[in-house]
Image: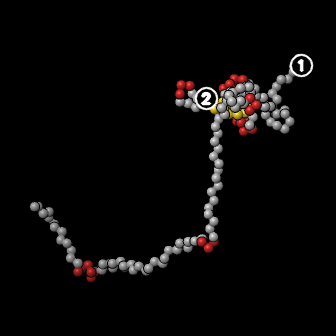
Amino acid sequence: MANKTKRGSQKGQRGTTVGAPPKPVNWPSGAFTIKTLVGRNQRQCELSLRNKVNASLESGEIVELEGIKQPGGKVGRPKSRYVLKANFDATAMKQKNITLTPVVAVSAPAVAPSQLVVPAPCVAPPSPQIAVPASPAPETAETASTTEATPVPSEPVIG
């Protein structure tokens, strides 16, 4: 068996960190889009490059320029453009307008304890006694004889 040089993965062999070692990004010298960045770094996936662009934006390493609108005024999302902060030229490049709205804390007016009105607990007033009529007495033999019975014809009446 020949003595081969092992060229396997370096995953998990970097001390205490886990995973593959980070790959360096080949940043363009001028303005670029994600598409041009992916073209220059073909050994990295687009999502990793997008995450590195977002991290570099937050750290201030790169600057976001105004986007490229769709040609011919077509409908669609403009393409974002970026440039390294070291290569940013304010006279030739227009930085994206980022307007931040300040958060204003709203406070309630101060109220003295004597001005505080606390409503009383809700208690239902006592209800008056309502007289309930008694149910009618059941019929007895005496009351049944005093009522008239309706006669039922034995033969049908032909009109």
Looking at the figure, which quarter contains the C terminus?
Answer: bottom left
Residue drawn at x 65%, y 32% is: 94
First-in-chain label (2 vs 1)? 1
- x 18%, y 68%: residue: 152
Do the residues bearing badges 2 and 1 touch, measured as CB atoms within 8 Å? no
- The quadrant of the picture occupied by the N terminus is top right
Amino acid at pointer 1? Asn
Could you tell me which residue is drawn at 72 percent across and 30 percent down?
88
Q: Tag 1's secondary structure?
A: loop
- Quarter where residue 24 is shown: top right
Mark 2, secondary structure of its residue: strand
Residue in the foreground of this view, choosing between 148 and 19: 19
Q: Position of residue 62 (x, y in %)?
A: 72, 33
What x and y, as percent, mark residue 54? 70, 36
The residue that disc 1 covers is: 3
The extreme top residue here reads: 2
The reply to whether residue 107 is visible in this rendering is yes
Mark 1 packing: few (<14 Cα in 10 Å), some, or many (20+)? few
Residue placed most toward the observer, 97 or 155: 97
* Amino acid marked by disc 2: Ile
Q: Quadrant of residue 91?
A: top right
Q: Nearer the viewer, mark 2 or mark 1?
A: 2
Q: Position of residue 78 (x, y in %)?
A: 59, 31
Residue at 30% x, 78% y is 139
Residue 51 can be seen in this image: no
Q: Give the camera-side residue of 138 and 114.
A: 114
- The mark found on residue 68 in the picture is 2
As drawn, is 23 to the left or to the right of 50? right
Percent across and percent down for residue 112 are 63, 70
* Residue projecting furthest to the front: 91
Q: Nearer the viewer, residue 93 or 72?
A: 93
Q: In this image, 77 relative to 61: left or right?
A: left
